[in-house]
Amino acid sequence: MYSKASVILLLLLGINPLYASDTKPLDNSLVALPDTCVALREGRKCYADVELNWQHSTLGNYCLRDATSKHIMQCWLRQSNGKFNYAFDSIESISFELINSDTGKIIASAQVQLQWVYQNRQKKRRWRLF
Amino acid sequence: MRLVQNPLQKLMIFVISVCLWHSPSYASNRYYADNTLEPTAGFAWDWSAGAGYYIEDSYLVGMDSYSHGVLLDINLALSYERFYLDIDHSQLSGGVIIGYSLIDKFDWGLDILGTNIQAGFNETGLDLYAEGTIKELDGIKSRRYDFDTGLRLTRRFENSQISFEYLHDISSAHNGWVVNTFFSHILPWQNWEFRTGLGFSAYSADFTNYYFGITPSEATPTRPVYHTGTSTSMIFEFHAEYPLNQHWVFLGGWLSTWFSNEIVNSPIVSQGYQHKAMMGVRYVF
């Protein structure tokens, strides 16, 4: 994902990259990677390729949905784990839920948090390049 | 109110400290604004510090055509209601603008502002950490940073804006006027922000002669007396910024300036253009 030079630069600066290290899903879990998206300015959309991994201790019918809109993103039949690639494109944090499609019960949830660098959104900003 | 005063007092101490930190460089101040964003109400501020690497092809005689080095920067952007203050020390130079919005209606703005337009230089040239005298500049008087005040009229579009300024020096450096026209555009793409700008400036004869004229006391056999009239310049810049995480950003930029013959013909100017590129990182507190 990163070039060799940028990885060295990040290591030198002690920076945690946007894309966090791999974390294996726990039992009955839903994990979003990365779990944070950083936009440059408050109020601007943030973009990230998020991988949603889930697993459950038993085979079953499960669906992944947006926790707020309840929009179903994908369903799996007779599975105990799955993966979904989500193109995060939002001006706010988004939560996801893994539900049992037979009972509607929420099995696990995960959130991609939105952060930003600059908070001062002033119109009369004068930048100095050099 | 008390909650606002305490941070403000601390900020003023910080601002005064930064203003006193001063060293020579050539710089450009330009406007940009993403007018699709809703401005922060009340008091808001960001400050940051960073470091980068630059390469420069300077216009002053005797300076290395391709000088390069590390530059440090300290920046503060502060706004409160109609008041705003920006300090940008991308080269630890005196990049300060203070402004007040008089009118802000129907995509038009009229501001009263004070800012530095031209960086000073002396026998050591424009380089940030230069110490030794440059042979071709030996004997010239020091040209001071100016501080100009005036009015700015701005027409805003979504991610673009065009500005017209009339400014006059109040620092007694050159006692002349400067007229600036600048068009800027911000292009967000994914989490990147690209900024481009194109500007045209006119400088009074007082300004031009103060920085680029040669007085009889500065003249040498190879540096004749030089006196000229009003001058102009054109500027293009491109800037890219990307958030590495919530506090660190990557910065990269290019700045090109072209000067009119009144400046180019000066005995202390070696060429009619200056190019500069930089890249680095910045920590936003």
Image: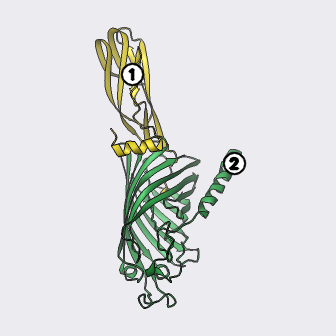
Report the residue that reaches farthest toward the right.
B2
Return the residue at label 1: A24
Neighbor class of circle 1 (other Cα within 10 Å; few <14, some 14-19, many 20+) is few
Task: Please identify, in this view, whether the residue under mark 1 or under mark 2 is nearer the observer.
Answer: 1
Name the tint of chain B in the rendering: green
Of B54 and B36, the residue lying toward us: B54
Name the tint of chain A in the rendering: yellow
Q: What residue lies at 38% left-to-right and 27% top-to-bottom?
A: A22
Residue B6 numbered tag: 2
Q: Amino acid at mark 2?
A: Asn
In the image, is residue B37 above or below residue B123?
above
Marks 1 & 2 on one chain: no
What x and y, as percent, mark residue A102? 35, 8
Q: Amino acid at mark 1?
A: Lys
Name the secondary structure under disc 2: helix
In this rendering, would A1 be left or right of B12? left
Q: What residue lies at 45% left-to-right and 37% top-to-bottom?
A: A16
Residue B3 numbered tag: none
What x and y, as percent, mark residue A96? 41, 23
Does any portion of residue B244 appear in the rendered image?
Answer: no
Chain label for disc 1: A
Of B224 and A120, the residue lying toward us: B224
Name the secondary structure under disc 1: loop
Does any portion of residue B263 appear in the rendered image?
Answer: yes
Q: What residue lies at 53% left-to-right and 74% top-to-bottom?
A: B168
In the image, is residue B210 above or below residue A67?
below
What x and y, as percent, mark residue B278? 40, 58
Neighbor class of circle 2 (other Cα within 10 Å; few <14, some 14-19, many 20+) is few
C-alpha distance separating marks 1 and 2: 47 Å
